[in-house]
Each structure stands twice: as C-alpha cells, then as structure tokens.
Image: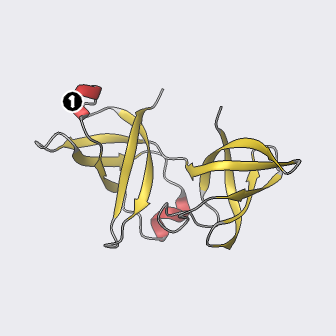
Amino acid sequence: MAEKGRIKVIKDSSGGTLTDKGGNDLDFTQIYITELFLNEGDVVRFDRATINGKPAAINVVHQTIGTITAINDDNCTGIIQEKEPNPNKLGKGVPPNIPFYTPNLKELGFLVGDLVHYQLLYTKAGDIVAVNLVEAG
C-alpha cells in the first residue's frame, strides 16, 4: 500500500532522500525525476521496500488529487483542477488547471466532476500534463 512523504533532498538525476510521515528518512531511486516533475519539498506517494538490507522508497510519484473540469470530444484529453496541490509546485510552474491525457475516458467511466489521482509529466516540449488517472476514494 502506498505511503505518503515529502522529498527532502534530490542527490542526482535519479534519486535522493524522502521523509515518511513518521519522520524517517528513506533513500530512493527514481528514473526520470525531471520528467516526473519531482522537486525537493514535494509531497509524494511511494511504496516501501528493502534494498540491500535497508528500507527504501520505490515508485515515487506526486501526491496529487484534483477534479476533472472538462473533457474534450476526443475522449482522451481534458482539464483537471488541482484540489490538493503541493504549495511548492505552483511556484515551480505547475498551473492549477492541468491538461490531462488518458485514453478511453468514456469506457473507464470518467466524467466531469470526478475526483481523481494522477501523475504529472514534464514533456520534451516543456509542457506539464497529467496521466494515469485513477478514481480518488
């Protein structure tokens, strides 16, 4: 089950240290830190694992939650308005209304007004997009 924490230090382009809710520091390795828009101070979700005999964080992604405010006719794009933004993210260029891309929205049952979790990606074109939408409890 995913846990919640905050990135403490990014040591290099593939990892760093985060602090869990209990105040414990855990090292993590996460490829594509830049593309996943991970920054020091960001609130994240992660899974806990034992790596080389030490506790570590894996699968580190933003703790994001927002409401679908628009779905385009193409049935795979739209806009999410963040409900629980990390205060640091807005200062680092993430808009409160984020475009998303998720194929087959209609078939997955997503509608305007749905509360969702998602992952943020920083594209090669310099845009921020939300992907991998899942229903939020």
Q: Residue at x 24, y 35 (%)?
A: 104
In the image, residue 41 lies at what x, y percent? Answer: 64, 63
Q: Name the residue under label 1.
A: 106
Q: Which residue is drawn at 85% across and 51% down?
A: 52
- Disc 1 crowd rating (10 Å Cα; few below 14, some 14-19, many 20+) is few
Pick whichever, 123 or 45, lies toward us.
123
Residue 80 lies, with reference to residue 11, above or below; the image says above
> In the figure, residue 97 lies in which quadrant?
bottom left
Residue 83 lies, with reference to residue 7, above or below; the image says above
In the image, residue 12 lies at what x, y percent? Answer: 67, 74
Left or right placement of residue 74 versus residue 117 in this view:
left
Which quarter of the image is occupied by the N terminus? top right
Q: How is the image coloured?
A: secondary structure
Residue 50 lies, with reference to residue 107, above or below; the image says below
In the image, residue 30 lies at what x, y percent? Answer: 62, 59
Kind of residue indicated by mark 1: Lys
Pick whichever, 94 or 57, lies toward us.
57
Q: How many labels does the image show?
A: 1
Q: Residue at x 26, y 40 (%)?
A: 103
Q: Say which element carries label 1.
A: helix
For the view shown, which residue lies furthest in the left direction?
73
